[in-house]
Image (cartoon, rainbow, N blue to C red):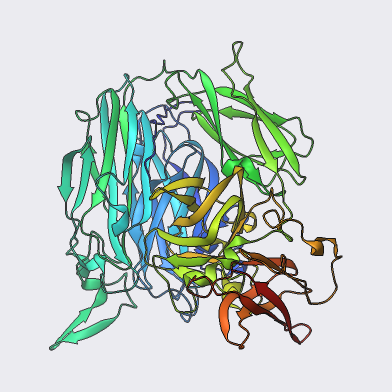
Amino acid sequence: MLRKIFLAFVLIFTISKSFGDTTKAQVFSENGIHFGNESLYENDTVNVEDNGRVIARTLSLPEFEEPVKIEAHLEVKSYLDPELTNGDQGDPWDRSGTIYLSVPGMENIELLKFITGFGGHSNLKNDVSNLAPLLQGDAKINAFIDTWVSPGWHVDLELIYVPIDTVENPDWANGLYYDSGLSKGEVTDQNPGRDITIPDSHERMNLVYYTSGHSTEGSEFDEFHKRDNVIYIDGQEIYRYTPWRTDCENFATQNPYSGWWYEGSQKVYSYELSRSGWCPGDKVEPVILDVSEKLTTGEHRIRWAVEDIGENTAYWRVSSYLTGYGDITDWQPEKIEVTSSASGNMVIPGTIVSLRIDLVDQFGNLVPYSDNTVKIRSDSSSAKFSLDQNEWKDSLEINIQHGSALVWVKSDQEGEIPISVQEISTATPLDSPEDIIISYFKPDIEEKVNFALTATATADCECASSETAFHGIDGSLETKWCCNDGAPNWLKVELQDTTAIDYFVLYNAGAGQAPAGDPGSGDNSSMNTQSYKIQKLNNGEWKNLIVETDNPANEAGDISFHKLDQPVDIKTVRLYTDLPSTSRIYEFEIYNLDSTETSDLDNDPSDCILSPDDFELLSNYPNPFNSATQIKFFIPLYGKVSVAIFDSQGRKVKSLLNGKLRKGFHTLKWMGNNEKGNSLSSGVYFISVKYSNKVQNFQKQKIQTSTYLK
């Protein structure tokens, strides 16, 4: 995806004190990284994300005025280590890990990339002095280990600040790129890349690049293959190298649980094998390039490429950031820009929406230095604001020092919430944006047509015969479409005919809707589809209808609702997912909220019937029909439903539905066609609806007659 990024230069500022002695900032202390098991997390100061594989802490780091050397010290050990447990639990594998910094308005910035030993114990150090502009004041630091085990790993992390006159700290730093799973399909002659604007006030710049190849399964293990990594600026190749480590045999003590085998009489351990830029139990060294001559004042494009990535699940973990030097004290903000994480600014009540506030100059560049206070408020009494998602207030005053800030907003009531952001700390306030309008609504879809139920679906890949594209639109929250090839994926839905559509519902993995014991009941919110597009096929090209880049991995985000401003005529629609790399979609539902179920079929007399208390099959309408008829039924509890059409000889000619539905009215449309989509001959046909549920031990079939006049 092409995306324009302006450099978020950050000046060393806010001198609260100077110090002459070493200062330590304890980030993590005896904190665990486990997969899933929340009972193992006991430290209230550390937040747990990604189902336990990420721990995060926001803390105040030392502030300084003289040059300083900053070193990150990381100790990581498996719970297999006898010091932690009796040695009977823990993660025995080599897992990729990273320590990274989260800054609003930037990509994540890696402080330390590492690989755990096979169930081992590693002590790692990394000089991060080039990130001094960001490693002071309030900061959010994260630790990630790609574990699927609980209990997993034990982490201690501290930052050590040592004043040294010989160190020259940069004046700014900016995160450019961060990808935890770069796969073959994502590398093109244009991507991954970033457009940047370099200001006048710069003297020298360094580009930092981290990379390591991996694979989870399949035949192409990129960790054991040499792949060229290439960096381009403005289309010109500036650096090419092959990351490869041949010294892994030196890390025996960090790999006590490594697998081994014999080659002849020689015993070979897995940890000893040469790999793509890393060794189990050690850190990954970055590439640091002086790009001062390449990045002159003005606009540029940086592109990163890993060539010939393997098929299947081969992928690379790569990141990059810029650091630089120059006097940027005169760079001042002129206006405020606010962006919302809510797609179309329409969400259901209770959903937490993030707002990013940027202070920018006249060209739209995020400023390097700011000392501005902004106030965020709403005329609606139901709107609440927060800086940490824990404490909520009617309004907030925020001092922005890094040019950018994140704020969260929510409302428990339906209706439009106008939000204003104004600068209040200077005599001449910055230009403020128009009010952001967030619409909180939850439309009633119980009696609306889910057009996906009568559609056909295809996908670029499927995990198993029980997890096909069909299972993503079958009406059942027990089943799902799954795709696990490590690349962006798509689910394409072909409607029976061109239909005006204005509403989509996506039941993602982790939605918590599948009953206990069913396939989705064990999913968690970290598997949620966080980045995706809903697209319409238009003259052979895909046109974006919805673009979601920050669907939250929490309860609200696991079921996402998307309303278009106006209905759009659609025949073919596609759900395109790119985060996480494994797609898990339980239901993709498609509606038109502005029309009734019978808008194209005149007035259905069954609309006057009150809601029944039992399973009911209402008369299809119209009957007789010559183009389409609607089949309406009611089920009293969540259960299994199959709807099929039979001819006068009792032969099944069309299956309309075979899945599980929620309680309520449901409507299907039959176009007088067979399984192949061919129009049937005129005649009398039987509509069969079978319904069963486990709660009442209920099973029943109802049949009605319909006449089709071709």
The residue drawn where x is 81% and y is 62% is 605
Give x and y (percent) for residue 221: 26, 69
Q: Count up the numbered dots.
A: 0
Q: Is residue 643 left or right of residue 26?
A: right
Give x and y (percent) for residue 67: 35, 30
The residue drawn where x is 43% and y is 36% is 134
Give x and y (percent) for residue 212: 28, 58
Q: Quadrant of residue 344?
A: top right
Q: Quadrant of residue 644?
A: bottom right
The residue drawn where x is 85% and y is 65% is 609
Q: Nearer the viewer, residue 26 or 486?
A: 486
**Residue sticking out furthest to the top:** 427
Q: Is residue 2 above or below residue 660?
A: above
Q: Nearer the viewer, residue 483 or 136?
A: 483
Give x and y (percent) for residue 236: 17, 37
Q: Quadrant of the N terminus?
A: top left
| Residue 16 visible here | no
**Residue sticking out furthest to the left:** 264
Q: Is residue 397 above or below residue 69?
A: above
Q: Is residue 420 left or right of residue 357?
A: right
Q: Is residue 57 above or below residue 528?
A: above
Q: Quadrant of the C terminus?
A: bottom right
Q: Nearer the viewer, residue 609 or 236?
A: 609
| Residue 208 visible here | yes
